[in-house]
Structure formats: structure tokens, C-alpha cells
Image (cartoon, rainbow, N blue to C red):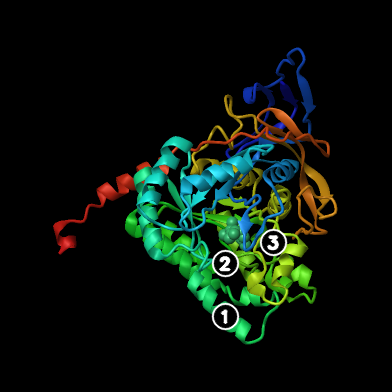
Amino acid sequence: MSILIKGGTVVTADQSYQADVYCNQGIIQAIGSNLEQPEGCEVIDAVGLLVMPGGIDPHTHMQLPFMGTVASEDFFTGTSAGAAGGTTTIIDFVIPNPQQPIIEAYDQWMQWAEKSATDYSFHVAITWWDDSVYHDMATLVNEHGVNSFKHFMAYKNAIMAEDETLINSFSRCLELGAMPTVHAENGDLVYHLQKQILEQGIRGPEGHPLSRPAEVEGEAANRAIRIAQALNVPIYAVHVSCEESLQAITRARNEGQRVYGEVLAGHLEIDDSVYLSDDFEFAAAHVMSPPFRPKKHQDALWKGLQAGNLQTTATDHCCFCADQKAAGKDDFSLIPNGTAGVEDRLSVMWDSGVTTGKLTPNEFVAVTSTNAAKIFNIYPQKGSITIGADADIVVWDPNGTRTISAKTHHQNVDFNIFEGRTVQGIALHTLSRGNLVWTNGELRTVRGAGKYIKRPAFSSDFDAVKKQASLHKPTAVERN
Ligand code: URQ
Ligand code: ZN
Ligand code: ZN
């Protein structure tokens, strides 16, 4: 199918300009003024509309087995919901059980993801360590296009990586040219505080944020960043939710350390008052980790994004319905952690970022698509409007509005953390490798049409850290 997007304004992370965009055989074939309409080509009238790279969500968990249940969103429904909101690529997570061969886990997730409607890739979590993990990481990098490995510093007695595992895995990442990423919360502290709070008789969802205060995240973020510094490896912090973590990232970046930070649309817009509701279902629906924070953290996170100390936005889309959340009815530590967002991230970021002047349209593209493509080394195939790139495009109505609701969203979950919010900025048409998957309010996704995206190792970060390390050989004096 060939599509000509006519009369629009192309908006990339770098510039905005009037141009037509012609797509055929899954890629962008031509960009220019008054392009010819080839025979049989479908035309999208984009006059008054913006033509942007499809969103990249670097943090989702479709159909994740977690805390005794399985996330309600699968790879088909989740990627379809993403398309409805303008997102065309997700980077999800393979999360091996401790002692499970990581290749076996990778094969399992690849099987689950075959039903995806749009393109997908995987970070692989390192939840345990021995020589087999050391070797299998190389197989994943060299044969399967995995260039990032996740480390959960939280979730003690489950998938938590201790410092020794962080050190072993980060070192291996440097050798392989793969980005280490972290969920930075001190899992031992969380475990201790959960027990303490439950013993005090606080058993409702209000106990969740009490057991994970910002300092628990800030400590872990700083620890992970310092370990990365000592090993001279880049590092990417997922779902940075508080001032303390942002300060650790900002300090490191100001000292020239290669540290990247991701922020969730939810953490930018929702505060911890949600946990004070008397309605268990409402409060439990907001239980995710790190938790939603007091308002001052939202202000700090926005400034971090504007200052370039946070580079990407994501959703951590991990859905559990009310009946699943009820597992923690009498003990908040048993409430499956996770909230949705894959469908609403771009509209929420446009509404809260661009219409308010916090972000320019170009910065919006950078933080919803291009930066993630660059950090995870799939630019310009993804995250760009350039000839030869995948035709992953969202035709955006900057003035259109919609009211977000679980009653109308395409996400397979019975709750929406942005419920009732009317947002300005909506996806009118979404193309996934040149196929219209969302148009004028209608989903046209095809089960299994999505492709696995390999991500090459040794992004430019690794050349840089190697040069930095070679320049800073400790002298004899320093050695003494
Ligand atoms: O921690 C994560 O990122 C996964 C398990 C999703 N759940 C969550 O609360 N963030
Ligand atoms: Zn996490
Ligand atoms: Zn996550």
C-alpha cells in the first residue's frame, strides 16, 4: 500500500517545515513540496495537521506474569491501543525468573509478542547471575539484537538484583556495548518498611507510598549511577519519579557522566493524593512502583525534562483489573503493581507540555520518540521522518480534543489513571511501516503485523565512554 500525506507540516526533533510525505513498501520514499500522487496511491489530507515520527514507548509490560497474576493487556491489544494514541513502537521487557536461562525467557516473550500489531523490541532483565548469564548476554546481543539489559533494584525475594549482580552485569554490558537500565528503588528498604507499616496496622493502599518514600528511590538511583561511574559504563534510569533521583542524574550529567533518565507521563501529571481515597478500587488502581509522588516532584520532573536531564517519556504500561488488584484487599504489599498509559502518553504530553509552552513541538517529538530511538540505537530507522526510514508516522491534530476514559479507551483494562481528563492534541492517523493502523477514530490494526526490531550494540555512547576511559588512565601519582 502506498500513501501520500499531503499538505502537512513535518515536525521532527530538529525542525518543522511544510512538506508532503510519500510512503511505499513500508518506508518513507519521498519528502517534498507538491509531490506527485502515484497511481493507486491513498492520500491523507494533512492541511493544518502535523506529520511526526510515530511515538516510541521504551517501557511497557504486555501480558507480564507478575505478583501471582498476568497483566490484562496482551501484545495485540496493547500495541493496538498504542496505535490509537500515535505510538508505533514499544520496547517491552523479558523478565526471566531467577535461575531461568535468559534465552529461554527471551524465546517465551518472543512467542507472546508475535501477535503484536505494531513493531516491538525487548530489554532483557538480569534477575540472577552465573557464568551462563554472562555467556547468554553475548548471544542475545550478537544474535538477537538486544542492546539493553534491565536491573530491578526493587522486588526483594522475587526479581531483585543485588549489587554484586549489578556490578557483574554492568561490566558485561560495557564489554558487549549494551545499555544497562535500572528500576531504582532500594528493595531491602522497601521490604523492611512494608513489614513495619503492616505491623502498625496500615494495610490499605495508603500504605504503598509510605513503604516507598522518595529517599528509597533516590538512594538506589545514586548507587546505580555511582556503580556505573566506577565501571565507566553508560546507564539509563527508568521511571524517574522524584526529585532525589533527578538530582542524582543531574549531578552525574553535570560531571560529564553518561546517564539518561526516563519519566512516565503518569508521574508528571498525577500526585499521591490518589492513595488517600476511601475507595479501595480507585486507590489500588494507582498502585505502581515507584508510587505517584507529592506535587513538588511533578514540578521538578517537568523542569528536568525541559532542562534535558530527563531524555525520554514512557508509560510503564502494566495493566491489572480491579479483580486482580483485589488480591491486596487486606495487605497493600500484595496489590499487583502497575498502571496503564500506552494509548494516552502522546496526548497527555502534548496537552500538558506543548499547549502550556513547557515543550516546543520539536521537543515533544524528541521526548516521545527520537531520543529513545537514539539511546537504544534504532535511529533513524525509527524516530525520524527521513527518506529510507520506516514509515512509522502519526498525523497529529494539535487542536483536536478528546476526553480520556476507561469507557472508551482501547486498552484492555478497566481503569484509566487519566480518567475524565480532556486533552488537546490527538492522533488522527497512525501509520505503522506505511500501513494505516488508526484513522479517523477507527482501529485498523492486524494481529501479527508488527515486527521485532533488532537494536545494534555499541551506540555512540560506547565510543565516547571508551575514549573518556583511555584519556583518564590513572597516572603513577594517582595510583600511589
Ligand atoms: O516495576 C515495573 O516496572 C513493572 C513490574 C511494572 N509495575 C510497576 O509498578 N511499575
Ligand atoms: Zn519498574
Ligand atoms: Zn516497568
Q: Residue at x 85, y 54 (%)?
A: 407
Looking at the rendered structure, the kind of residue marked 2 is: Cys
Residue that label 3 marks: 269
Looking at the rendered structure, the kind of residue marked 3 is: Glu
Q: Position of residue 352 (x, y in %)?
A: 71, 55
- Asked whether residue 176 appears in the rendered view, the answer is yes
Question: Which quadrant does ligand 3 occupy?
Answer: bottom right
- The disc label shown at residue 261, or none: none
Looking at the rendered structure, the kind of residue marked 1 is: Lys
- Mark 3 residue CB less than 8 A from any atom of ligand 1: no
Q: Residue at x 71, y 28 (%)?
A: 435
Camera-side residue: 415 or 293? 415
First along the sequence among labels 1 and 2: 1
Q: Label 2 to label 3, Cα distance in Å? A: 12 Å
Q: Position of residue 6 (x, y in %)?
A: 75, 25
Residue that label 1 marks: 195
- Mark 1 residue CB less than 8 A from any atom of ligand 1: no
Q: Residue at x 52, y 56 (%)?
A: 97
Kindly state the secondary structure of the residue where label 1 is placed: helix
Kindly state the secondary structure of the residue where label 2 is placed: loop
Q: Label 1 to label 2, Cα distance in Å? A: 23 Å
- Mark 2 residue CB less than 8 A from any atom of ligand 2: no
Residue that label 2 marks: 242
**Is disc 1 in contact with disc 3, using a CB cutoff of under 8 Å?**
no
Q: Nearer the viewer, mark 1 or mark 3?
A: 1
